Image: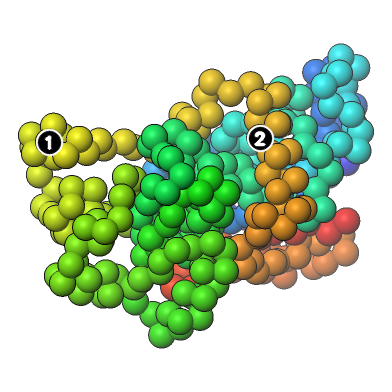
Amino acid sequence: MTSSALTFTSQFQSHATEFLHLQPISLPEVVGTAQVKVKFLAAPVNVLDLLVLAGKYPVKPQTKYDQVLVPGYEGVGVVIEVGGSVTALHVGEHVLPKDHGLGTWRTHAVVEADKLVHIPTPSNPVFASLLKMGYTPAYLLLRNMGYLKAGDWVIQNAATGTIAQAVIQFARLQGVRMVNIVRDRKDFNVVRLRLLALGADMVLSESQLEALVQVQPLSHTRRIVLAIDSVFGSSGRRELGFLGGSGEVKLDVNEGLLFYKAVEFKGFRTLRELAGWSQEECGDLWAWMLKLYDEGQLKAPEVEITHWGSPQVQDAGELEKKLLYVVEKTANRVVGMPKQIFVFEQ
């Protein structure tokens, strides 16, 4: 069997697809005793993937064929063959990568079974493909970064992102209130209504937030106990001010913030937060999220799908051009652009 894969040889210098190519990769006819063969169904294109292509992400791709690397750090697949000693997975079961770096930008793969986590058959594979790097970080941000009670308020910027939209929904399920900040944009009212429909309590543009701070700090009337900053700069400083109750502040870590106002600074990385989780625990978490989706309590973000067909059916040169365009589009993303997803043809 041959897999169609996007591969790269070295970090790019000028543009994201500089060393990215579509190539066929021959897979072994018989998998190893502890391995499984997987057909991928969907794989997102994330900003994290661009950091990988640039050589700036600390976790490197795990999959290498003849000195070329396979990118793609999340996605969903289905098992089509299992090795003789594999008992945790079976043919026909759906899986997600356990760790970063598996290499999901390919149609098929042979991998060690312990690199995968079994999940229930998803009603929407595209939603399932976003669980690991979209919905899991959102859940862990609320679970691990603060001590939240029903009625507490959280403020976050970059609120139209996939993770931020998931944060809104998990907060709603916990009774936690959300202030959501988005960049100034022409379609602000449309975005505001969309986020309110997900469960947001307040949606403000950056300029609206700045004006509000100058008139009356938001935290005078609301118990804001957690700020999630994905932008940094002045936007992040304003969030810090809400925790301290004084509007925008200079990033000066002093006794006033640390002791009197008890502000804590925590960096967040999904891989670190999941480090102590077993495959079974990850599987239970993702099964719960799929159940919430089927019940209508979680919704998928707006996505744009690019179909990845077989090079035998579709001209390989045209297919490569189409796939590389999606990667470049993500690298040059504009405000409001939907999440880009590769969907592999059945």
Taking 34 as reference, is 89 above or below it? below
Residue 204 percent coordinates (x, y): 35, 71
Taking 116 as reference, is 201 above or below it? below
Residue at 18% across, 67% down: 216
Q: Which residue is mark 1?
A: 260
Residue at 38% across, 60% down: 179
Relative to the observer, which residue lies in front, 164 or 315?
A: 164
Instruction: Name the amino acid type tagged 1.
Output: Tyr
Quarter of the figure with residue 1: top right
Numbered disc 1: secondary structure = helix
Q: Which residue is mark 2?
A: 285
Residue 34 percent coordinates (x, y): 80, 18
Residue 187 percent coordinates (x, y): 46, 83
Answer with left or right where residue 139 lies relative to residue 209.
right
Residue 311 percent coordinates (x, y): 81, 60
Quarter of the figure with residue 178: bottom left
Numbered disc 2: secondary structure = helix
In this view, the residue farthest toward the bottom is: 186
- Neighbor class of circle 1 (other Cα within 10 Å; few <14, some 14-19, many 20+) is few
